Image: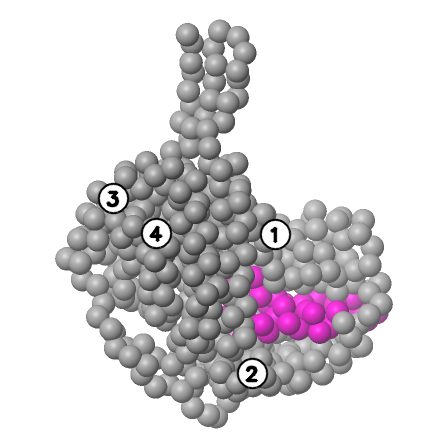
Amino acid sequence: MNIINPATGDIITTISADTESSINEKLIQLKKGQKAWAQVPLSDRIAALESFAAFLQQHIEACAEILSMEVGKPLQQARNEVNGACARIAWLTANASKYLSEEWMVTEGATKEKIVYEPLGVVCNISAWNYPYLVGTNVFVSALLAGNAVLYKPSELATLSGMQIQKYLYEAGVPEDAFQIAVGDKHVGELLLDADLDGYFFTGSYKTGKYIYERVATKMKPCGLELGGKDPLYVSDDITDIKAVAAGTADGAFYNNGQSCCSVERIYVHEAVYDAYVAAFVKEVQSYKIGDPEAADTYIGALTRKDQPAFLAAQVADAIAKGATVLCGGKPIERKGYYFEPTVITNVTHGMDLMREESFGPIIGIMKVGSDEEAIRLMNDTQYGLTAAVYCNDEERALHIQAALNAGTVYWNCCDRVSASLPWSGRKNSGFGSTLSHAGLRVFTQPKSYHLRG
């Protein structure tokens, strides 16, 4: 399997993909090792994952360089990702004992009652390429803390980072029979769907998530899906620092080249501030440095997938054909690698693909609205439900709008962020189940109820 550098189109290296035989061998190893790992005291499992985070920090430059090279992410953003993963691990390890230890519910009277959180067994984590450290951490760290063994499939576009993760987990004390990686493309993914596993946890597109859910449904095993979004943002008429709001929301749309599940994908702006906001937004986007991901001042690097520039160009063409106006960008960049101009489009409607289908690239549509009610209606007019943001000065107004939004996460005066202390979950085509927070730790367990009468 060739590993490609998307900034150049060149082959970085060639590695061997797993086969049916090697997957079966790994699964046998994990099934044997899981029970032993579950018997390791929780405090020791916590210590191992804390050591893993320490190794990531110690080797952050190596991790960031490999990540940048194989997915096209600017080097500083790659460092940010590794640091972010370490912060999540810190919360998960600090709170694992609180949420994974047995709970006494009734301690008085003739019958005492408690809950014990037992691991699922051997779980499959089919992960994503856009944030391999962050979205991987969401799953495999929590699963390991809960006493599961993990068969982890990094995206074929982020395989080298997956190998780094495995290396540092082993060095941190996680045994080989508790964690293995499956290397390969969708054909290896099919082998995992056929395998006898105790849970499936996928991060990626709605289309693939739906397919995985349908394939494993008859197994009657837990299946968690963290899927995409078409995340809306509303700028109200009472904002005062338009320049700052434009800069912050542009970053929410274009950070990591827009290749984030929770990137801002469509913006609604109150007509009273629309012109000023759009002008400031375009000025901010035009200031972004595009280029070599390894350059210190690069903000927009290469897109990870070879076919993505053509996909984005098709969204632009559809929007133009239906009356939209391109204020900046709008086409692939003629250079080696997979690049697309940061693109801002106005005069958009919900009849355009740009405002309906996930873009996952450096492109945004901005639409004028006349009221909060119109903004709410348009924000909810989607098959997705991952995140939604509102920018305004009045907290009560913001809370009213947030309460009306059908999304798993809502933001006030911020966007495109994830916190380990809060559940990360989607609605509708954005998936279901939770990672992170107490919910994300316990999703990798099966509670057992004890009724004890002496």
Mark 4, other Cα within 10 Å: few <14 / some 14–19 / many ≥20: some
* Gap in angstroms between the C-alphas marked 3 and 2: 44 Å
Residue 173: which disc?
4
312 above or below 392? below
74 above or below 189? below
156 on left or right of 416: left
Q: Nearer the viewer, residue 64 or 308?
A: 64
Secondary structure of the residue carrying tag 2 is loop
- Mark 2, residue position: 296
373 above or below 263? above
Does the magenta segment cover residue 206?
no
N-terminal of the two: label 4 or label 1?
4
Residue drawn at x 43%, y 90% as measured from the top left: 336
- Mark 3, residue position: 33
Amino acid at the residue labelled 1: Thr
Residue range (magenta)? 245-273
Secondary structure of the residue carrying tag 1 is strand
Q: Can residue 341 be seen?
A: no
Secondary structure of the residue carrying tag 3 is helix
Q: Nearer the viewer, mark 2 or mark 4?
A: 4
Mark 2–mark 1 contact, CB under 8 Å? Answer: no
411 on left or right of 272: left
Residue drawn at x 58%, y 66% as measured from the top left: 263
Residue 409: which disc?
1
Mark 4–mark 1 contact, CB under 8 Å? Answer: no
